Amino acid sequence: MAEDEQFWADQIARDIITRKTFHYLDKPAPEIKEYVVKTSASISGVLHIGRLSDTIRGSSVFRALQDQGVKARLIWVAEDMDPLRKVPEGVPKNYSEYIGMPVTDIPDPKGCHDSYAKHHVDEYFKVLDEFVQVKMEKFSMREEYKQGNFNDHIKTILENVPAIKAIQNKYRTNPLPEGWSPWTPICKNCKKIVTARIKGIKDGKVEYVCQDYQFESSLAKGCGHHGEDDPTKSQGKLLWKSEWAAQWSRWKIVSEGAGKEYQVPNSAWWINAEIVENVLDWPMPKPIFYEHLIIEGVKMSASLGNVVYPKDWLEIASPELLRFLYSKRLMKTRSLSWKDLPQLYDEYDHAGRVAFEIEEEKNEKEKSHLSRLYKIANFEQMQEPLQMSFSYAAALTQLYEEKNGIMDALKKTGHYQPLLEDKILERIQKAKNWLDKYAPNEVKFKIQTTVSKDLNLSLQQKEALHEIAKKLKEKEWGEKELSQAIYDIAKEKGVSPKDLYKAGYQVLLGQERGPRLASFLLILGDKAVKLFEKV
Ligand SMILES: [Zn+2]
Ligand SMILES: [Zn+2]
């Protein structure tokens, strides 16, 4: 079975390449020389790792297109004409006066950039390219409008207001009013973009009066100004239910990601899809609908203080791991809990082992899916999976300060891979950061120096620990073999394996849980023997 039969991005790529007609119209699809995939982010909110989901998924489709032998291109667009909707946490309260202004036109509260938008985009760009395969071409909507790159689209859209209204009215209970316009000007007096209420269109010009605009939890104050705006002279923007279509047409987009809320039939996706086909003569792009990322069971939000920035992610995990997380099956909730990060690493390593046929996967479908997923997460160079799990790395960093100690321990337990030493060290460092910031207490430990008198171990438990110490001194053990030996000792002494592990952890760590006992004992060596002999 070909690997790419199972993977969602390959399926989308195939659909795009083999498309014969428009989606709504019985009209032949245009011949495409270069397949452009668009990804974007709104700059009015914070650029957390949730925003990368769109980009990473788009880049998977881009990669899949390339792998099917066509020329492809990935672009990133800053939706930076969006108005500021409320004053975010950490921004001075007096920024409320800017509510309703495009984020490109608001000063940088930190003072280091030309604007609020520039500040956020700059921070984001520092790491963005690490998460995608190619250096993306990046566009700013504010600049695009200023340069007149949308003028043709704006003209066509304004000439077709009745058709656009008809499309939207199909999904509305109250039809759009007389004089409605898909163009929204920036008020010439107060520079706000949501407050200009359209009064009518005359000779291609839009007349407006600036009035209060109510957002969900805040108010953009209007200034009362009466004005006239020429949309081709660049001071404003198209409404989203037209602008998206204009973007698809301008860049000839074949695919774009959108959150699952856009799947419903009356969403901006489908309205723009009808507009782009009927008015702008370009077939609807193939949507990549996806679930959003949930952290510890809740959506990321600045007010909840659970926002994870791309740079935070890189402290504890690699870009590959995030690509892996996002590229798993599309419509499954992405839920991430920091304490469970080692499990995500384990899944990733497992996919790697399946891809490299180090581990057998009997289910062919699963095998091809995991292999392709691993390949996509890795870009060009397929990284041989590490034998050192993340939890193991976390345990090692608590035992050794020095690189040498860690490498020796890995050699002893058979987890050392000379060619991957850099990757090993990288994972060790990330595990260390994870322990500092996110790890639950039960994985943190300190090796005991003496055996506490209050352990209350049974005679059988003590005998079993003595026996383990004896075995450890006998020879160099392998992990599996030792694990079996411990199990046998437990049986022989009449202790349940669980109780024996517990006793071991209590003696070694002063707590009831710890890293996998056999490998832990191999790393500790003499230290463990001495403690067990003393019980
Ligand atoms: Zn700045
Ligand atoms: Zn105004």
Image: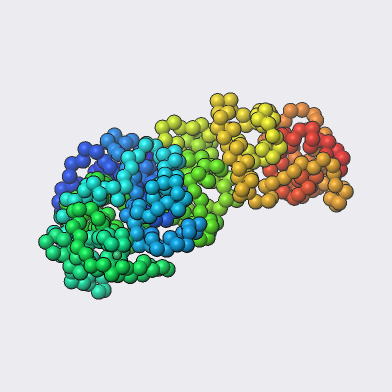
The x, y position of residue 452, in whole percent, is 85, 47
The x, y position of residue 225, in whole percent, is 26, 67
Image position of 407 (left or right of 12): right
Vertical relation: 101 (above or below) 413 = below
Q: Nearer the viewer, residue 297 or 69?
A: 297
Count of residue discs: 0
Name the residue located 20 percent from the left edge and 69 percent from the top edge: 199
The x, y position of residue 408, in whole percent, is 68, 28
Q: Nearer the viewer, residue 104 or 319?
A: 104
Q: Residue furthest bottom?
A: 174
User: Which quarter of the image is occupied by the C terminus?
Assistant: top right
Vertical relation: 319 (above or below) 80 = above
Q: Can residue 217 be seen in this view?
A: yes
Quarter-of-image position of residue 105: bottom left
Q: Nearer the viewer, residue 473 or 534?
A: 534
Image position of 41 (left or right of 529): left
Image position of 252 (left or right of 322): left
Name the residue located 66 percent from the left edge and 38 percent from the top edge: 397
Q: Can residue 373 be seen in this view?
A: no
Quarter-of-image position of residue 56: top left
Vertical relation: 488 (above or below) 210 = above
User: Which quarter of the image is occupied by the N terminus?
Assistant: top left
Name the residue located 57 percent from the left edge and 35 percent from the top edge: 426
Name the residue located 40 percent from the left edge and 63 percent from the top edge: 97
Q: Residue furthest top?
A: 418
Q: Which of 231 and 495 is in front in this view?
A: 231
The x, y position of residue 69, in whole percent, is 29, 34
